[in-house]
Amino acid sequence: WYKADGDTASNAADLRFAFFRSCFYSTGSICFGSLVVGPVRVLRQLSAFFRPSEEVNSLLCLHECLHFVQTCMASCVDSLADRFSQWSFTYVGLYGYGLVDAGLHSAELFEKRGWTTIVSDDLVPNVLFMINLALAGLTGMLAYSLEQIEALSLTSLGVPRMTSFLVGALVGLVVSSVLFGIISSSVNSVIVLFAASPVDFEQNHPKLSEEMRNAWREVWPGCMDVLDMRVQVAGYLDPTFNGSVRPSERHPLLP
């Protein structure tokens, strides 16, 4: 992202540095996030059932009290979701923040770009989760077939065929979750970097930058206004983009 194509040695060094920092200095944040991010995401999805409607107006005291309670609960859930989100891991890996600070910085970034609604759309995680379930079912059926056809005793419980299906499904779910977790993290990293440093992307990979901005315009009209303005201003100030990036947006993997 921050280097032109062909600079493989520098990219490898940056990757090693990021891996070392994440494993040795950010392990606590990653483990803490793995513990709380999942439940917070589920809680935010469940909050849609008790989130108050802005269109309903009533002067009844009971209704007003209920509306106040719902607003407080939704505000608390949103506050937790800002601090413990999937984007926190991306900021921890790129910039080395703590988990809570990483979540707040990512929420602030998307709010400034006007992408709050876009990043709230869990399309990619939901699609990958459905694929995980499908793979879990296939591996469970494979284990069931081995138990039935080959007469292999995969378990000594009273219901061997059902147990073999559950064991196979569990193994497939865990393995596929690890694989698709890498894909989901890569997508999150691209979105964060695209929001944080569009000028660097335009400078080092102009063709990919143009394709990405055009694709985003088709799906989310108007979402590229801020990024297009930043790229145009940077090109006006310096056609080579040298010195056009603020110090806070320099290469995040450099010490």
Image (cartoon, rainbow, N blue to C red):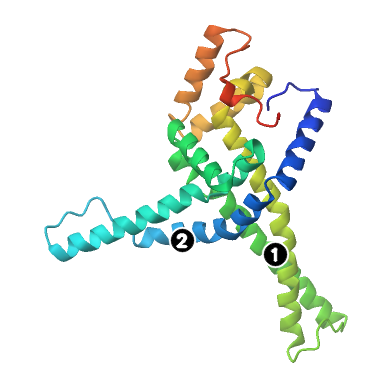
Please provide percent x and percent y for residue 51: 33, 57
Q: Is residue 172 left or right of residue 102?
A: right
Q: Residue at x 84, y 80 (%)?
A: 149
- Res 116 quadrant in image: top left
Q: Which residue is mark 2?
A: 43
Numbered mark located on residue 173 in the image: 1
Q: Residue at x 49, y 30 (%)?
A: 217
Instruction: Return the residue found at the far bottom.
Output: 158
- The N terminus - image quarter: top right
Please provide percent x and percent y for residue 30: 65, 51
Q: Residue at x 42, y 50 (%)?
A: 79
Dot 2: within a 10 Å radius of its alpha carbon, few (fewer than 14), some, or many (20 or more) residues?
Answer: some
Task: Tell which of 72 and 97 is nearer to you.
Answer: 97
Residue 253 showing in the rendered view: yes
Q: Answer above or below: position of 209 versus 81.
A: above
Q: Answer above or below: position of 31 versus 107.
A: below
